[in-house]
């Protein structure tokens, strides 16, 4: 998928210095002759560059240096020095050490997305396209929208659709969190206040990457069940993992949806659920 096919969510950060990307690209020339490893580095660097320039990236495979990639490197060394084992061993030592560094970097892409762009859940172009088709033209309220990547992508695809993004922005009070503004209009209000103001005006309520440090998600679910029982509730997160409270996962009735273009690329298995 080239950049012209990606969803433009805004201007992006337009950062000129991204240490993570510089470190990753420092291995690009070394592994250029080894296609599988070169493609891995390119996929991750393209993801960073797309978001930085204001585009939602493409979907990602599991990000790791696989056994097949290690075998590709070994074959490259043998082919380069078939009759010179000393030189082959020296090259293998250099490449294997660098391969470990590449593996570490790609496995920590999510940390880089959080650090540089405040993107916690991975919001890709194919996923937002799927989500937009799934939602149709129904009016939507997003709770806990964070920096607004999900609503920004949906708004870009369907500018006439009613999409209300809200967040209480408590993340601004946490240490080492970026103070950059959301990438789209996000109203500063709590989830309960957003439900009271907009709950009757929408057909779908979305909640993505609710924190696992409070039971606010459970409080919201109870209010939705009691006061807005006909509304469709979509939750994006990791079941009993990195997102949402334990009581929420215990009490929510879950139906997985939209798995085609929304799957894990690291150890966090975020999914989309319809919740009763």
Image (spheres, rainbow, N blue to C red):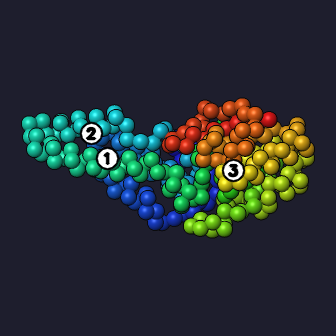
**Pointer 3: residues within 10 angstroms few (<14), some, or many (20+)?**
many
**Pointer 2 or 3: first along the chain:** 2
Residues under numbered marks 3 and 1 in contact, where contact means CB atoms less than 8 Å apart = no
Of pointers 3 and 1, the one earlier in the residue sequence:
1
Nearer to the camera, 43 or 276: 276
Describe the element under mark 1 as helix, strand or loop.
helix
Q: Nearer the viewer, residue 88 or 183?
A: 88
CB of mark 2 within 8 Å of CB of mark 3?
A: no
Where does the image place residue 53, in percent across and percent down from the top left?
55, 57
Asked if the residues shown at circle 2 and circle 1 are in contact, with their CB atoms under 8 angstroms apart, the answer is yes
User: Circle 3 sits on which residue?
Assistant: 210
Q: Is residue 274 left or right of residue 226?
A: left
- Dividing the picture into quarters, in which one does residue 271 lie? top right
- Residue 49: x %, y % from top left: 50, 55
Which of the 4 quarters of the picture holds residue 229?
top right
- Is residue 36 visible in this depiction of the protein? yes
Left or right: residue 141 compared with residue 17: right
Q: Quadrant of the C terminus?
A: top right
State the SS at label 2.
helix
Can residue 155 be seen in this snapshot? no
Q: Which residue is tagged 1?
A: 99
Q: Earlier in the sequence, mark 2 or mark 1?
A: 2
């Amino acid at each position: 998928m080239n950049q012209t096919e990606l969803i433009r969510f805004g201007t992006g950060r337009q950062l000129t210095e991204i240490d993570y990307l510089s470190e990753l690209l420092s291995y690009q020339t070394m592994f250029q002759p080894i296609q599988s490893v070169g493609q891995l580095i390119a996929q991750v660097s393209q993801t960073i560059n797309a978001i930085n320039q204001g585009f939602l990236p493409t979907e990602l495979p599991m990000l790791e240096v696989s056994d097949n990639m290690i075998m590709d490197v070994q074959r490259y060394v043998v082919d380069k020095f078939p009759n010179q084992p000393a030189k082959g061993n020296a090259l293998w030592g250099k490449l294997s050490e660098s391969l470990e560094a590449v593996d570490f970097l790609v496995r920590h892409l999510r940390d880089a997305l959080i650090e540089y762009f405040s993107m916690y859940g991975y919001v890709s172009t194919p996923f937002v396209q799927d989500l937009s088709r799934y939602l149709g033209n129904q009016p939507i309220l997003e709770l806990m929208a964070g920096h607004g990547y999900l609503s920004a992508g949906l708004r870009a695809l369907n500018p006439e659709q009613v999409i209300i993004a809200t967040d209480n922005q408590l993340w601004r009070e946490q240490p080492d969190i970026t103070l950059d503004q959301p990438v789209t209009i996000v109203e500063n209000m709590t989830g309960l206040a957003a439900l009271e103001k907009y709950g009757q005006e929408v057909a779908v309520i979305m909640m993505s990457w609710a924190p696992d440090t409070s039971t606010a998600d459970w409080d919201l679910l109870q209010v939705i069940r009691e006061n807005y029982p006909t509304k469709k509730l979509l939750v994006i997160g990791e079941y009993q993992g990195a997102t949402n409270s334990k009581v929420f996962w215990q009490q929510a009735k879950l139906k997985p949806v939209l798995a085609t273009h929304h799957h894990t690329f690291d150890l966090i298995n975020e999914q989309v659920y319809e919740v009763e």
